[in-house]
Image: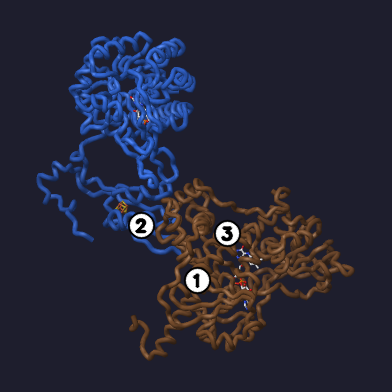
Chain colours: A blue, B brown
Amino acid sequence: MADLKVNLAGIKSPNPFWLASAPPTNTGDQIMRAFDAGWGGAVWKTLGQPIVNVSSRYSTVDMNGQRVMGLNNIELITDRPLEVNFREVAEVKKRYPNNAVIVSLMVESNQQAWHEIVKRAEDAGADGLELNFGCPHGMSERGMGSAVGQVPDYACQITTWVKEVAKTPVIVKLTPNITDVIYPARAAKKGGADAVSLINTINSITGVDLDTFVPRPDVGGKSAHGGYCGPAVKPIALNMLSSIAKDKEVGIPISGIGGISNWRDAAEFILLGATTVQVCTAVMHYGFRIVEDMIDGLSNYLDEKGMRSVNELIGKSLPTISKWEELDLNYKVIANVNQDKCIGCGLCYVACNDGAHQSISAKAREDGRTRVDIIDDTCVGCNLCSLVCPVDNCITMKQIDTGHAPLTWKEYQKNPSAHKHLGPHNAH
Amino acid sequence: MTASNQDSFHEIKPPLAVDQALAEANRCLNCYDAPCTKACPTHIDVPGFIKKIGTGNLRGSARVIFEANVLGASCARVCPTEVLCEGACVMDDVTWKPIQIGQLQRYATDFAMARGILPFTKSPVKKPGRVAIIGAGPSGLACAAELLRVGHEAVIFDAGEKPGGLNTYGVAEYKMTPAVALAEVAQLQKAGVEIRSGVRVGQHISIAELETQFDAIFVGVGLGRIGKIGLAGENLDGVVDAMDYIAELKIDRAKAETRTRGRRVVVIGGGNTSIDVVTQAQRLGAAEVHLVYRRGPEELPAYAHEVELAKQSGCRFVFLSQPVRVVGNGKVEGLVVQRMRLGAPGPDGRRKPEPVVGEELTLAADLIVPATGQEARLDLLKNLPNVKLDRNRPVVNSDMQTSNPKYFAGGDCVSGGQEVVNAVAEGKRAAAGIVKFLQNRQSTVDGRQFGAEK
Ligand SMILES: Cc1cc2nc3c(=O)[nH]c(=O)nc-3n(C[C@H](O)[C@H](O)[C@H](O)COP(=O)(O)OP(=O)(O)OC[C@H]3O[C@@H](n4cnc5c(N)ncnc54)[C@H](O)[C@@H]3O)c2cc1C
Ligand SMILES: Cc1cc2nc3c(=O)[nH]c(=O)nc-3n(C[C@H](O)[C@H](O)[C@H](O)COP(=O)(O)O)c2cc1C
Ligand code: SF4
């Protein structure tokens, strides 16, 4: 069995699976149950001056009967007294010395306040600190959370204050609610952060109740924008993660967060540069028990790939991410239908005909279903038909030899007329 | 299953809850040129109505159903979907589970029923031409609705005490109760369908009279009773015609129960009607139920899913047995059957049963229910002027028009017995034919081509 142990900037963990700072890490009792279930680490629910929450607090995006594709919340940081939280941190650390306990922090932007809370967290036994510069609702109106994360100078300043006193590794948690996540990441690095984690939640309104006209969640006839997370945000998180992981200036370890529900999602985050991954929504949906398959699935996957440690996976896909202009214009695939598998639903036909390049023909089959054929000459190889096809491996994309040497946009642009086969084509 | 539902007629397919309907609707692939739509005799836009359930647009969903089939509510319950829309569903290949189209159709039409959403709108613009419809069964009702949509006047004459035809008096009680069938008819009436119940054409009103009052006539009289099957002793007390038996149970459950509870029942047949009799006799508390069929299990004409149901209900099949006589002393005591074996294939390709000489068997019975084919309503059909019959069925063209251009016909009386949905499809087709007929007639009357008028 592959070795799942990881070390994020000095924070050791028996596996890369951490609970994100959120309701599943509200209390010591929950975290201990999570560790019993197999979680390697937990980032404590953000601590600061206790707040008062509203009711109700969550809403979801459900897709075609599948619940919680996206989760939105307007909850603030911890609503429990600091002493209670710190006492529980100490208790957890005492009972679970081998699991990683990271304490998430957020206080007003004041050097002394930060110094104080950092010391208290470390005295309680935290293995590391996570600075919450990401919460996009409520706290940001009070100049905290994403109000800090959105201004690189503030982020740098507060990180500097924390590093003045911190003895344990400091992780800066970034907000995705910005134009380019590289800048706050670089600012964190500049302030001395040992690692970054991302993403926190995305500003959102999940929907409007069509009977009351009030967006969800409804707080007595009013609502406010919240923070969005869950499976729906994974692609956004992966992109931000990879852009930081590829940035030479940042160059510090990363804890990946956003829409991770199973070992496959986790493996993708790790492939794009994460050392640990953090999970919130999937646990809110299904409970701590999901970690069992995350551990089992990841280690089976590593075994199958012949890797002895999860560390071999970290960042492995990064070299394949390039700029668009470096892609080969002469690489070509076209769609291919396996008629034996085809169930005759005709979905690829409408998709290509109305939504792509009119490159599939359809006629009625004898059994009343639809027979489809790819028109090879006009198929541009966009993938759409294979993506909408409901049958596994029925439509596949086959590479065809164009007989032309690899060509990037940069090269092409120097003399387009030398590459007439690439178009522009006449409309057909 | 057997013991618990012996005396219960609870619905075999209970309605879907919201979450079930949504999950099922979302499973539908929304096929292009959908095979389910083609497989439905009325060509309901199945993916169209299902996707509307998915978006919560139930009003729109019901509208899509009713546009193609004004009896969408009863069809949702009684259609043999296994061999129609669901039998064509591509999901059968993907997950081995077709979309529950009938159940979803019920979900949408139940909503319409509950909200009083009418199945069609009568045209506010009247068109010349009055149509008489004989029979308020599915074919007649569908025909009337389609004519009203276009603006013609239509009046239905029905011999029954209550309208609905076999929807009310025939289909198995665990699929649909008369209350549901009648509620559906009531919706059609609210939308404008006029029904004169208790009027038997040929008795209470003559065909000649109809001819003078109406410009076209649709004949949707269905089929009659099983009738005599030529069995010695079949007049004994305790031999009950399947159609009477079923109608009785639907109108007066207590009476049917008294007749059946604790009794040994032998049903003669092999088609879907005979299956309905055995499953319902079982539910009425029969001590034992036997189905006697001339040929073997492979030859059973009833749908496989219906046969399965009969088996689950506890019915015993007596294959390769030809009834020869009913025995008893004033009252039925048993049915003597002749053992058969399958010989060479006959002209229809099915192997012909032939007697095994000397092998007879007596099945003890208190109640014998012949449930072979229903008889044609020759009393009426024979008196339709110039309407040609073939094997006792009116001969029709693709417009459901008979050899007398003024007469159209459809449903069981033409097909010899199919499904409710076929009757609806034929009623609809006949209506389109009648509209054409009346237009042509009108244009000759007016001396100008139809279409010139606005
Ligand atoms: C026992 C049984 C079970 C069935 N189960 C199913 C099922 O589960 N699913 C399914 O899809 N189909 C089922 N069918 C078939 C279905 O009921 C018929 O195909 C359908 O009802 C035919 O419709 P119709 O309009 O042609 O005739 P009918 O429904 O038979 O209606 C004919 C109407 O004409 C009236 N009538 C007759 N003579 C006259 C007259 N002289 N004057 C005025 N009115 C007259 C009758 O009163 C009746 O109301 C079943 C049939 C039977 C017998
Ligand atoms: C109800 C709720 C409360 C949260 N509270 C915090 C918080 O206190 N501190 C924090 O850093 N992130 C908080 N988050 C964000 C999560 O830690 C995490 O970054 C985000 O949910 C994305 O991960 P996911 O897609 O696995 O849920 C919260 C999320 C939710 C749903
Ligand atoms: S790959 Fe794109 S262009 Fe080619 S057939 Fe499929 S949908 Fe059409």
Q: Find numbered disc 1 in the image and state the secondary structure of the residue it sits on.
A: loop
User: For residue B200, which quarter of the picture?
Assistant: bottom right
Q: Which residue is mark 2?
A: A349
Q: Is mark 1 within 8 Å of ligand 1?
A: no
Residues A203 and A194: in front is A203
Q: Amino acid at mark 3?
A: Arg
Q: Amino acid at mark 1?
A: Gly
Residues A271 and B154: in front is B154
Q: Earlier in the sequence, mark 1 or mark 3?
A: 3
* Mark 1 belongs to chain: B
Residue for point 85% across, 68% down: B358
Q: Is mark 2 within 8 Å of ligand 3?
A: no
Q: Which residue is mark 3?
A: B77
> In the drawing, does residue B218 fall left or right of residue A108?
right
User: In the displayed image of the protein, which residue is found farthest to the front?
Assistant: A220
Using the rendered image, report if marks 2 and 3 lie on a common chain: no
Place of residue A106 in the rendered image (x, y in percent of width and height, measured from the top left): 30, 20
Above-or-below relation of B29 to A95: below
Residue A315 in view (yes/no): no
Marks 2 and 3, how far apart in space? 33 Å
